[in-house]
Image (cartoon, rainbow, N blue to C red):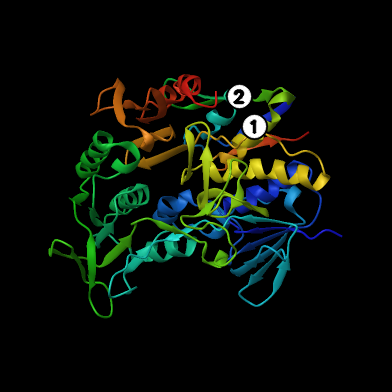
Amino acid sequence: MIKVDVDMTKCQHYGQCVFEAPNIFRLNEDDKLEYLAEADDAERANIEAAIDVCPMQAIFILED
Amino acid sequence: MTDPVVIIGASMGGLRAAESLRRFGYAGELVVVGDEPYAPYNRPPLSKEVLAAEVSHEAVAFPLRDAVADVRWILGHTAVAADVTAHTVTLDDGSVLPYSQLVIATGLRAKAAELPSGMTPGRFTIRTLDDAMALRAAITPGVRVVVSGGGFVGCETAATVRKLGADVTIVTRSTPLARVLGEEFGREIQRRQEAHGVRFIVGSCVSDVLGDDRVTGVRLDSGQTLECEVLIDAVGSLPNTEWLDGTGIDISNGVRCDEQLRALTPEGTIVADVFAIGDVARFPNPVFDDTARRVEHWNIPTECAKHIGKVIAARHRGEPEPAEPFAPVPSFWSDQFEMHILAFGLPALGTSATLVEGSLDGDCVFEYHRDGQLVGVAGIGLRSVVQGYRSKFMSTAKAA
């Protein structure tokens, strides 16, 4: 499993991560970011892509 | 021993290319050359946070991951020439770097409008961290600012300096943002900016700067003059390709590439071992058609970097290169006052723009179509709704 963390004090809900990893990130009806804190290893490349495109650099993978 | 992979350009694209090469298993030497004195940093805050607060390089610098810890950074130097036969790049200090593969990531520079008086104190561009920090020092409540250009940079910068109390006028040849998002969308952005006190002069351009020692105003092509203390040039950008003169690479508008981002000659021949990425790359995208375009949207440098990392890493291992063409879906956003704009695709290609959700004076979503294909979606607010159009977009995309 991969542990995903988003610094919600930085996140501006721009939604760029949703394009890269739609199974992990989504914008809710209020356009606020929601995400899964634990993801399958198969999602690693998508999560890394989401980290790369985050305009606020607010997404992290917590390594054990 | 093989020569290093050399990346010219140390902005987001250059950094992501280095990371991508490592991620796909390239373990050889990596050299990244950047003309600014800074390690790679994030540019979106330049027109927002950096202007609004005391923000330093540390606050906007990209974290340097372990994977790129052994990259050799050459910062504060420009590439001045390349020899694609000998496989070398020459820097401004005369040093010559041999390469096994060359990645062109030199991006764009602000187009300094060709005005007779040149750069007078009080006149700013906004492309680099130093630009933004210099501009910040000039913005005080009540200062009169003319923004030349009604694109994203102009509109975002206008909103930020207006919020800081400046008196702002945007001078633009056409409706703001209309070139990218259509006339109707652009007029609504203008209306909302005006509601916050930003003035617009549409259908005109700055033709001269007034003031000898510093900016005291501008003259427009209509003959009208405006008094101001600050002029912000946001009239667009130019590809940094002069250093590639004489290499045989087609640099007629950025670096022309094929569907694998390999650099091409004007005749369409591949220039061996040279790739281009990011804003400077002009590439065809099978999602839309076979026309090569430069795409100045947010995710493009990162998507390009991912692609060439895969190709070059395979090449170094002597394995077959991936055959899938580069086919990214561009995405971008813009914050101006309370407006959150989110878009993907290439709305600019649309021959029609249709309001599909909400109402123009509130939150809304537009679809952009060309020849029966949904080529882009953009919204003001309703970001989750915009996201929801992604599957519809993919289902009509040419590459799908």
Please tell me whether residue B152 is drawn above or below residue A36 in the rendered image: below
- Based on the displayed image, in which of its 4 quarters is residue B84 positioned? bottom right
Viewer-nearest residue: B131 or B113:
B113
**Closest to the observer, B373 or B301:** B373
Q: Amino acid at mark 2?
A: Ile
Q: Is residue B14 above or below residue B96?
A: above
Residue B360 in percent (x, y) is at 24, 28
Q: Secondary structure at mark 2?
A: loop
Mark 2 crowdedness (10 Å alpha carbons): few <14, some 14-19, many ≥20: many
Q: Chain of mark 1?
A: A
Distance between mark 1 and mark 2 Cα atoms: 8 Å
Q: Which residue is mark 1?
A: A47
**Residue at image point 22% right, 49% down:** B198
Q: Residue at x 21, y 39 (%)?
A: B191
Front position in the image: B288 or B44: B288
Residue B169 relative to residue B90: left or right: left
Pointers 1 and 2 in contact (CB under 8 A)? yes
* Image spot of residue B336 (x, y percent): 34, 42
